[in-house]
Image: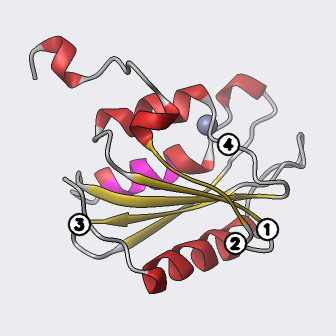
Amino acid sequence: MDQIVTSEQRRELLQRAIEARRIAYAPYSNYRVGAALLTSSGRVYTGVNVENAAYPDSLCAERVAIVKAVSEGEREFIALAVVTSNGGTPCGSCRQVMAEFGLDMLVLIADVDGNLKQETTVSDLLPGAFGPGDLGR
Ligand SMILES: [Zn+2]
C-alpha cells in the first residue's frame, strides 16, 4: 500500500510531533521525543516517550503513538513523524513494532526545529524484518 502523503500532511505531522515532544516525560535521559502517526482513517495519533525510574520500563514515543492508534481500532498506518533534539532515529524495538503493521509506512525523522533529517520507510529502517508473514499471517 503506497499512499501519497501530501506536503501539507507532512508539515502537520512534523508540527504535531514537535508539539507533543514538549510534554514528553523524560526526567532521566532528558532526551525528549515526540511522534505523530497518520492512519488510513485520516486521524493523527501523537506519542511521547514516557520514562520510568525502573529504566527498562520506559516507553518510546513511536510505540506510544502506535499503541494509542491500535487501541482505538486503527491498524493501517500511512506515515509517522519522529522528532528529537538532534534528529535521532527510531530504536530497534520501535522499528520492529512498526514492521508489524506494514513495511511501506513513510517515516519522517526530524529535529525539533522541523528540519527533516531522513525521509524513509519501515522496510528501509528494518531490512529483512521478521513479521506476521513469518507466522503464516
Ligand atoms: Zn523506540
- Cα separation between marks 2 and 4: 15 Å
CB at disc 1 and ligand 1 closer than 8 Å: no
The residues tagged by marks 1 and 2 sit, at their Cα atoms, a distance apart of 6 Å
What amino acid is found at the position of numbered circle 2 in the picture? Ile
**SS assignment at label 3:** loop
What amino acid is at disc 3?
Ser
Q: Which residues are magenta?
A: 64-69
Q: Say which mark, if any, is on residue 18.
A: 2
Residue 106 point in image, percent of width and height: 42, 55
Q: Which mark is residue 89?
A: 4
CA neighbours of label 1 inside 10 A, class few (<14), some (14 to 19), many (20+)? many
What is the three-letter code of the residue carrying label 1? Val
Q: Nearer the viewer, residue 51 or 30?
A: 30
Q: Earlier in the sequence, mark 3 or mark 1?
A: 3
| Mark 3 lies on residue | 40
Q: Are marks 2 and 3 in contact (CB under 8 Å)?
A: no
- Verify CB contact (< 8 Å) between mark 3 and mark 1: no
User: Quadrant location of ligand 1?
Assistant: top right
The residue indicated by pointer 1 is 112
**Mark positioned earlier in the residue sequence (2 or 4):** 2
Q: Position of residue 109 (x, y in %)?
A: 63, 56
In this rendering, the answer to whether 105 lies above or below 124 is below
Task: Report helix, strand or loop for mark 1.
Answer: loop
- Identify whether 68 is placed above or below 136: below
**Is ligand 1 within 8 Å of the beta carbon of the residue shown at mark 3?**
no
First of labels 3, 4 by sequence position: 3
Front position among marks 3 and 4: 4
Residue 65 is one of the magenta-drawn residues: yes
The residue carrying pointer 4 sits among few (fewer than 14), some (14 to 19) or many (20 or more) residues within 10 Å by Cα, namely some
Classify 10 Å Cα crowding around label 3: few (below 14), some (14-19), many (20 and above): few
- Of mark 4 and mark 1, the one earlier in the sequence is 4
